[in-house]
Image (tube, grey):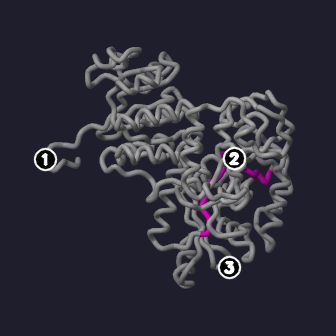
Amino acid sequence: MHATSTTGSPPPTVRYAITGARGGFARTLLAQTPRTDRLRPSVLCDLDAEGTVALCVELGYPAAALTVCTTPEELAALSDDQTAVITDTALLAHAAYDVLVEATGSPGAGTGAARLALTTGRHVVMVSKEVDSVSGVALAALAEEHGVVYTPGLGDQPANLVEWYERTRLLGLDVVAIGKSGEYDLVFDPATGRVRQLDQEVDAPELASLLTLGEDVPATLAARARAVADIQRSAAADYCEMGVVANLTGLVPDVETLHYPVARTAELADVYALAEDGGVLRRSGAVDVFSVLRLPEEASFAGGVFAVVRTGDDASWALLAQKGHVVSRSGRYACLYLPYHLMGVETPLSILAAADHHRGSGSRPPAPHAVLAGRARTDLPAGTRLDMGGHHHDVTGVAPVLLDSADAPRDVAPLYLAAHTTLARDVAAGELLLLGDLADPEDALLDTWNQALTRSPLNTGGQ
């Protein structure tokens, strides 16, 4: 049964535009859209117009309804049942849509597209975490100024985790840590003594004796980390997503490199306990990422999200433990988790919530509680180009770190503001990139970052 408006007529169809329309995230959203009531794509923006059309035809969209447009006049001539395919984000100012889904992954282009949408009265569902990490605070303020919504999109871990955290707060649970699993599991086969992550496989027979935590949790975690040291487990994308979550929740990283424990799902309540209780945390209220360790026949965490909370009534949580919930061996902590993130399959929920209810994920506007920054992996001479690329949008020669903004230098350079810039001076291995190190930062990104700096807590941050 469909909802109706107060006048008795059915609610209108919600039209969305998507940038990065040829990408993997866009594919999952475009595939789901025909299955979702009241939702349709009206504008598809991507540098590869031909590939975008081919993708949509492959997904079952009628070829005759997909029209490549290069001018405002061509957009204006479209009928309501046609979908515009464009390559220039500037044309979004002339297109008919209600919500922009920003999925370019490009800090500069994504910021420009989001700004244009917000200032022309459209909501923005942000799935480019690279954009959000630099410009999210300023874009959220711009959205408020124009009476529209700026929100991360459900289906990506930041929005899923923020909403999971908000649920725990609403219930009055005492949250110790929140986070997500890394994108890919460590799958250990006791029969062969080998561990696999995607298509990489290494010998790690010592994991057979490390499948339980033992009495010394940090020692076991350290031994597991040594066993899989040849596998790259951390990714810039993880740090970026946790930075977005920090800014929307006020929770901050416990350590700048994140803990990245190699842990089994059933262990999370023991792992993310305070150090005084045998866990890894130095303080309560942390964001973090863990690497899933599982056997081949065990279910994946699927890049899902978790919240570790202090338990209350012992009898209540003992009962919950009997029902299979993850409770620490001490009974003091419990882990509540969602083992999935479905990318664009879930994003229609954010699009419709923004259009229908002017509601996004989270109960508070973002503020710069954390800074996704970078430390030089090696000595980087002046003139080095900080290229960004790869599946996880790593920056060449730079290791991502997530800083508590209270401890961050005021002139630290956000990682994705530094991306694609040239170094103006030498940066020694291990040094943080600072704004003054960048010869040619993009003006639009500098503008949004400087706006973020005017909002607490960065404006009173460390030196």
The alpha-carbon separation of the residues under discs 2 and 1 comes to 55 Å
Element marked by disc 2: loop
Q: Which residues are magenta?
A: 176-191
Q: Please tell me whether residue 325 is drawn above or below residue 10 in the rendered image.
A: below
Q: Quick check: can you spot residue 260?
A: no
**Residue wearing tag 2:** 411
**Left or right side of 17 for 279:** right
Nearest to viewer (mark 3 / mark 2): 2
Q: Residue at x 59, y 40 (%)?
A: 130
Marked residue nearer the N-terminal end (1 or 3):
1
Residue 371: x and y in percent read 65, 50
Query: Which residue carries the number 3 mark?
Result: 330
| Residue in the image at 52% along x and 20% along y | 47
Task: Specify whether 194 is left or right of 412.
Answer: right
Badge 2 amino acid: Asp
Identify the secondary structure beneath mark 3: loop
Observer-side mark, 2 or 1, equals 2
Q: Which residue is mark 1?
A: 8
Residue drawn at point x = 69 percent, y = 32 percent: 388
Alpha carbons under labels 1 and 3: distance apart:
56 Å
The image quarter containing residue 309 is bottom right
Dominant secondary structure of the residues highlighted in magenta in the image? strand
